[in-house]
Image (cartoon, rainbow, N blue to C red):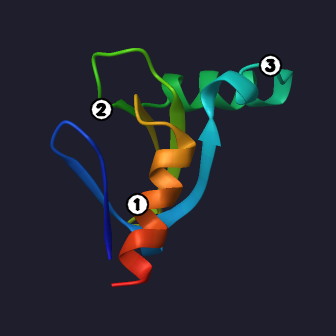
Amino acid sequence: MYLHLGSETVVNTKNIISVLDLESTSVSKYSKEFLRIAQEEGFVRNVSDELPKSIVICEEMGQSVVYITNISTKALAGRIKKRENV
């Protein structure tokens, strides 16, 4: 099953490690450090030009990828649940 993250970006739900609210996540110093390192190492992919709301962490081909999307965690969770019920 696949999840649309915005623009033309789709990920396999089997590859998703975590879906995080950006506002809540950016409060923690550990989360900030994780995002800073991921950005420096080239693992971050911004999939929207709009205000970011969520972070989706995936493992693709043995490597972590951090997607930043304007879709809320609630909407992403709803999309996943809807697809599971099909």
Quarter placement of the C terminus: bottom left
Query: Which mark is nearer the camera, 2 or 1?
Result: 1
Please report whichever mark, 2 or 1, sits nearer to the chain's N-terminal start: 2
Please report whichever mark, 3 or 2, sits nearer to the chain's N-terminal start: 3
Q: Amino acid at mark 2?
A: Val
Q: Residue at x 51, y 22 (%)?
A: 40
Tell me: residue 60, above or below residue 24. Answer: below
> Tag 3, which secondary structure?
loop
- Which residue is tagged 3? 27
Q: Residues within 10 Å of mark 2 (few under 14, many from 20)?
A: some
Tell me which corner region of the image, top left, top right, bottom left or bottom right, holds residue 67.
top left
- Which residue is tagged 1? 79
Q: Nearer the viewer, residue 46 or 62?
A: 46
What number of labels is visible? 3
Residue 76 in view here: yes
> Tag 1, which secondary structure?
helix
Tell me which corner region of the image, top left, top right, bottom left or bottom right, holds residue 18.
bottom right
Query: Which mark is nearer the camera, 3 or 1?
Result: 1
Residue 65 in view here: no
- Which residue is tagged 2? 47
